[in-house]
Amino acid sequence: MEFDILVVDDSAAIRKILQRVLRQTGMAIRAIHEAGDGQEALAVLADHPVHLVLTDINMPKMDGLQLLASLKASPQLRNIPVVMITTEGGEAKVGEAVKLGAAGYVRKPFTAEQIKEKLIGILQPALPL
């Protein structure tokens, strides 16, 4: 099965790095979509169903926690697993993300192996779109 993934980060460089890292995992990826913040992510999701969202926590306009809350409140989007990608040193925001329903988190800087380990367990049970 091939997966569609949405990468959300306000840094274009981080989005490109995440795309490269995702490709390096060797996982079967059909498409990687990008968004620069939570609002843009919701617009992308309206047109492109995905199996997974990787999102930064700290972003302008709509941050990752607000995006996560919006996804979990939507009957059409609530079952998409969300993995937080963060530089947050404090456990408070990570804890809040888990309470909101995040499937997990990865701290920056990350390696392809760390991303793969986190995503394998999340995507294995995913159903076709």
Image (cartoon, rainbow, N blue to C red):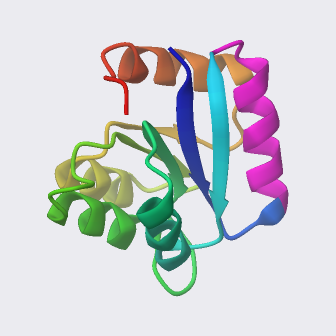
Residue 111 in sight here: no
Marks counted in the figure total 0
The image shows residue 60 at horizontal and vertical percentages of 57, 83
Residue at the image position 30 percent from the left and 54 percent from the top: 97
18 inside magenta stretch: yes
Q: Residue furthest bottom?
A: 61
**Image-quadrant location for residue 93:** bottom left
Residue 116 in sight here: yes
Residue toward you, 111 or 90: 111
Is 129 positioned to the left or the right of 20 in the image? left
Where, quadrant-wise, is the C terminus in this rendering? top left
**Measured along the vertical axis of the image, is residue 3 above or below residue 87?**
above
Is 110 positioned to the left or the right of 126 in the image? right
**Measured along the vertical axis of the image, is residue 50 above or below residue 64?**
above
78 inside magenta stretch: no
The image shows residue 87 at horizontal and vertical percentages of 60, 54
**Measured along the vertical axis of the image, is residue 1 above or below residue 77?**
above
In this picture, which residue range is highlighted in magenta? Answer: 13-27
* Magenta stretch, overall SS: helix
The image shows residue 24 at horizontal and vertical percentages of 79, 20
Residue toward you, 95 or 52: 52
**Image-quadrant location for residue 8:** bottom right
Residue at the image position 14 percent from the left and 58 percent from the top: 75
The image shows residue 44 at horizontal and vertical percentages of 53, 65
